Amino acid sequence: MAGQPAHTELPVVGDNAIAVTLGALGDEWNLWILRFAIEGCRRYRDWIARGAISNSVLVSRLTQLTELGLFERVRYSDRPARYEYALTERGRGVWPILLAMWAWEQSWAPESDVPLPNMRHRSCGATFTPLLICGACGESATRHNVSATLGPSGDWSRSVPASIGRRRSATVKRPSQILPHTMELLGNRWSAAMLGALFLGATRFGELYERTSAPPAMVADRLRRFDDLGVIESSPNPARPDWVTYSLTPKGEAFFPVIALMIDWGQRWFRAPEGPAIVFTHLVCGNDFHPRLVCGNCAEELHGEEVLIETPAGGTEQIAP
């Protein structure tokens, strides 16, 4: 995008990269718009044809995503003046996150109303499940061999966005549930904060309350919902029978690639002057951890131009030009 800065400087002591990222990608309609933008939608009518999105919602979300630098508004007609929305490098960079979300939903969530597209790797020709590796050493990366510490801008108060988690009226249109469990984890500001606290090692109710500043009733509600979804399990604390310990299940731990890719993307494009919100270290090699995806079939690193989406019509589309 001509004139677009390499990254966006965030205000001092304002929302950090995590909050900005969750505000952008923790919204169902934004993910829906980005999903179809990657498949080729550029004009209003392209998105309207894909589902029951209202004109006002489409306009507001495209405006937000353009202001955040994920789209460029390009004039394609003078009489009358008409515009289309082209993904920028920043917007195209979301594809690994969507890919990880789709893979997690396909493995761990019930079938959605709208089937997720199959992904095919051009190099080996196979449909595949992406695997997470360390960009420095190329070895496998999991929640257990990647450490995470809060950085200079990592205060919890700066990591929880105010723009998601609003109550939705039953009469308000929502996108087809293509990522239902992902949205349960990211589409509510307190859910996202508590998930982050769990990944950073919180195990008790009091720790979750202290780290997130969520109201106690909300902490209890989100813990019940996480348990219903199967992403956490509870057990008595041997030292204090009156305490309950919470831990991530295999389903919850399998969400780590989504978290790592979102934070890495956010901290690349949105930078607080004090420094990063989270610092990842790959314990296998000792280097700063920057996640990469490889094909689960041939083990080659995935690049956007090598990932093909299988369309409902039976063809394929390149995920990122």
Image: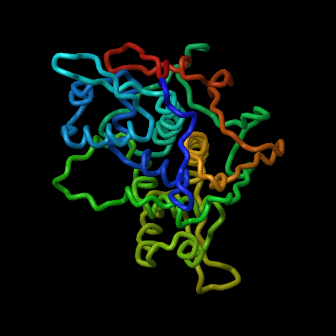
* Residue closer to the observer: 184 or 150: 150
Compared across the picture, whether 294 is left or right of 163 comes to right
How many tags in the picture?
0
Please state the horizontal and vertical placement of residue 296, each as a whole percent of the image: 63, 28
In the rendered view, does 197 fall on the left or right side of 221? right
Residue located at (62% from left, 68% from top): 202
Q: Residue furthest right?
A: 285
Picture layout, residue 228 above or below residue 70: below
Q: Who's the residue at 16% across and 54% down the image?
A: 171
Quadrant for residue 216, please give it: bottom left
Q: How is the image coloured?
A: rainbow
Residue at position x 53%, y 31% in the image:
93
| Percent of width and height locating residue 96 | 54, 33
- Note whether 138 is above or below 256 in the view shown: above
- Above or below for 64 versus 295: below
Left or right: residue 9 compared with residue 23: right
Residue nearest the viewer, comparing 142 with 271:
271
Position of residue 154 in the picture relative to residue 288 (left or right): left
Q: Name the residue: 68% across, 46% down.
A: 142
x and y, in percent, of residue 315 in the image: 38, 13
Residue 115, how many percent across, how many down? 35, 33
